[in-house]
Amino acid sequence: MGLSYAVRREFEYTLSPQDVISDPVRCRAYECDGLTGYRVIPDLVLLPRTAEQVASAVRVCAEHGIPFVARGAGTGLSGGALPVADGVVISLARLKRVLEVDPVNRRAVVEPGVTNLEITKAAAPHGLYYAPDPSSQQVCTIGGNVAENSGGAHCLKYGFTTNHVLSVEVVLADGSVVTLGSDTGEQLGPDLRGTFLGSEGTLGITTKITVRLLRTPESVRTLLADFPSIAAAGDVVSDVVAAGIVPAAVEMMDTLAIEAAEEAVHAGYTVGVPAALVVELDGPTEECDVQFEQVKQICERHGCTRLHIAGSPEERAAIWRGRKAAFAAVGRISPDYFVQDGVVPRTRLAEVLDRIAGMGADAGLRVANVFHAGDGNLHPLVLYSAAAGETERAEKLSGEIAELCVEMGGSLSGEHGIGTDKACSMPKMFTEDDLAVMRRVRGAFDPRGLCNPGKVLPTPRLCGERPGKYKPHPLEESGVIERL
Amino acid sequence: MNAPTDLRTLRTAVLDTSGRLAVAGAGTAAGWGGALEPVDAVLDTTGMRGVIAHNPGDMTVSVRAGTPLRELAAELAPHGQHVAFDAARVAGGATVGGLFATADAGPAALVHGSLRDLVIGVTLVLADGTVASSGGHVIKNVAGYDLAKLVHGSYGTLAVIAEVVLRLHPVPESTATLSVACTLPEAAELAAVVLGGPYEPAALEWAEGTLLIKVDGTERALPARVERLRAAVGGSTAEPDIWERHAALVRGADGRASIRVGVLPSRLPELLGALPRVSTTTAGLGTGVATVTVEPDAVAEAHRLVHEMGGTSALRARPAGTDAPAWGPPPSALGVLRAIKAELDPKGRFGPGRFAPWM
Ligand SMILES: Cc1cc2nc3c(=O)[nH]c(=O)nc-3n(C[C@H](O)[C@H](O)[C@H](O)COP(=O)(O)OP(=O)(O)OC[C@H]3O[C@@H](n4cnc5c(N)ncnc54)[C@H](O)[C@@H]3O)c2cc1C
């Protein structure tokens, strides 16, 4: 059907003609995010330059009942920024000013299009940094991070985006502007800030964000350790935790992931070992030294076959280069891949990885693993070749892995979000009542459902009447209702 | 009075009563927020207690919401784990649900935030009997909306919190507190030195002419760290019970109103200097959050001053017989708050009056 000429003119009048893209060829650049399997060419793409323009554009949408999708850098991995048919995309890319760095109060105020890394760069001269560090931090925007409640390797110790955002200015679906949260994190009533964080663009568009900054730690110690099995590496993680150590990061890679990373960046990992662990500690020098010694001993106790300690910032950077390259590098050992983001309780890591290996073998597909071992957030990469007709099998395996995580007492997603990708799997994790309450919350923010519709919550139209997997309802567990 | 013992009986209690309901925990904050309007029944959560599942290896625990946090702490202690949270009311037997619903926090908020940063899962019962959960036993989880955040600070007005899953932290091997006698402005200067240096304080509070700086760490490393800190700011090592005295000040005294205020940390001394008729003050110099006791008739003026400085304020203790206002000017998102209330509790059953006059 498409949006009318009159509506387009109204957007052009509200912004300016060159800030409204209607040429389908140019609109195509916005047809998908990092989950490229889903594509929809939007009718219009709006490129506002100020928060006021965002609000004005949303008011036009509200007036005409036009659905809109906010977009940051488009690096999302769950189809959150996938356009909707007959709707507009509102890109926040031009709102990219760092409005304030306040070293005394250790805060920064930024516009949503600022990249994650730019915040740290702006804070660095003051000895401060912004803690959540998604691997995509050079390009992804803070607005996208807020929407996804993004995590990163160092979130085990320091927490996720939600723990670092004090307040957000939000344009609601009716075009009104509100501030959620406060300068201190204190609340006047329910934590609407926290409700908005991680809502994947479905509750409004954030146009200004106040984040906490942390002092750069005095010391950082990093090691890379090889192990004869995933189980042994997993035991190290458990023992480190049991020793009362909270590492800044604990990352694990398996044979395939190591092989891919080494081929891509030659970071000094040992090709062929079953498992490698990256452990990083930070904090006051005295504490780091004591605990680093303990970690080394724990590694040795579990049969570590090689212990490489970063002796310089360059060596540390190399270790991280290998870890962070692993994702993209998988492209070198396989023409195509799907990435999953399920979470399992840390104590079940070895068991789950074993099951995943078995499922991969059954499906005749290889699965590479590179993940945040400290918090149980897996990133299984299902390798396949579309040319060889393996897509469907790979997609099925990938979905089964996510659902396995839920069965193990975990979650469908640790940081990439539900988006379009996993909306139809939500009934595996939530009861109909859980989802109904989430819909009510959504309705309170956006009664007409204009704001990023079709994401996060399953709809019959998108998912069909797919029956959920059996999961005991809380009332069933406590005996109120029974299912025979 | 209704006294459910678990999720099932809680749901029954909500459905079996009609009309307006108040949720009551241990009663340590019964007078916080707006004064409760008359209700038809009170739901006493203190019968819903006990750990549902503690997973020491994963450092998570689920509890019934009526469990006093200090009771939970005692159960976790043998595992060397704790909830990194130290609101002043904990010592008085406050329940996990009550602490959560009132968005309370103590000095540890400097590092660990408030309970909203530690709760990773929640099960709620709505006014129509709907049971809804979000989150679970994993610390990292972005699936669906975070319903826990919605009830953090909701003062029992949106849903009854039935169960809560908490993220745990290791109990530090060793802890020390340095105390420095100084005025509030001097304390603010010292706080800037501490926060600007490599000291990583676990808490940083000024109260009654003393700056308290707490550091947590390992037995081997801590003494050297404390020495470094002392070289930078002076002072002497305090007994651990100094924090109990601090908590007592936060709890306040009978007959006085107590308000919790929050403002940019750099503006806190100025704000506290401007508040009228204050008798005691505890000030979090890193967090910007302070609790003051004032004469009841000075509360309205205090709200106004805090608001003018861009801060937040909420009444804590309200002396009997006074009608000090609980809240200052409403937040800009009042429309959203009202809409959420209308969606989750359309008949206005839960906690009438708590957010008066806003809703
Ligand atoms: C190679 C690679 C590595 C990655 N590593 C990580 C990682 O380590 N950890 C991690 O958590 N994620 C990771 N991601 C995923 C992705 O980078 C994050 O989800 C990121 O936060 C998305 O930011 P973006 O600016 O690209 O947002 P987009 O993809 O443009 O949008 C994401 C969602 O946010 C919404 N949105 C965007 N801006 C706003 C706004 N201003 N207001 C409201 N909603 C908005 C969109 O509607 C959409 O739903 C990775 C992605 C890639 C490609």
Image (cartoon, coloured by chain):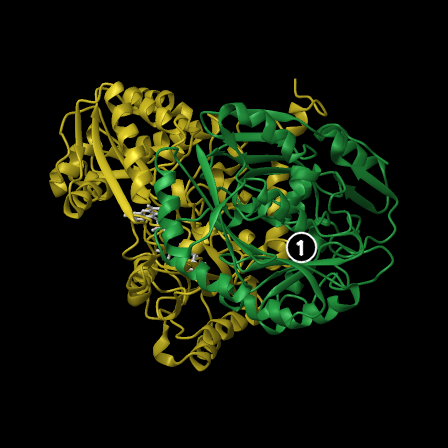
Chain colours: A yellow, B green
Say how many tags the image has: 1
Dividing the image into 4 quarters, which one contains the C terminus of chain A? top right
Q: Residue under circle 1? A: B340
Taking the image as shown, residue A98 lies to the left or right of residue B311, namely left
Q: Which chain carries label 1?
A: B
Taking the image as shown, residue A132 lies to the left or right of residue B263, namely left
Q: Where is residue B32 in the image (x, y as percent from the top left)?
A: 74, 52
> Does residue A403 appear in the picture of this structure?
yes
Q: Position of residue A225 (x, y in %)?
A: 21, 29
Q: In the depicted view, which residue is nearer to us: B162 or A378?
A: B162
* Residue A249 vertical position relative to residue B229 in the rendered view, above or below: above
> Does residue B94 appear in the picture of this structure?
no
Res. B281 image quadrant: bottom right
Q: Is mark 1 on a helix, strand or loop?
A: helix
Query: Which residue appears at 54% of the width and 60% of the height?
Result: B288
Query: Which residue appears at 54% of the width and 54% of the height?
Result: B205
* Residue A403 vertical position relative to residue B322 in the rendered view, above or below: above
Q: In the depicted view, which residue is nearer to us: B244 or A175?
A: B244
10 Å neighbourhood of mark 1: few (<14), some, or many (≥20)? many
Q: In the depicted view, which residue is nearer to us: A87 or B66?
A: B66
Q: Which amino acid does label 1 sit on?
A: Ile
Q: Where is residue B333 in the image (x, y as percent from the top left)?
A: 62, 64
**Label 1 beta carbon less than 8 Å to ligand 1:** no
Q: Position of residue A435 (x, y in %)?
A: 59, 41
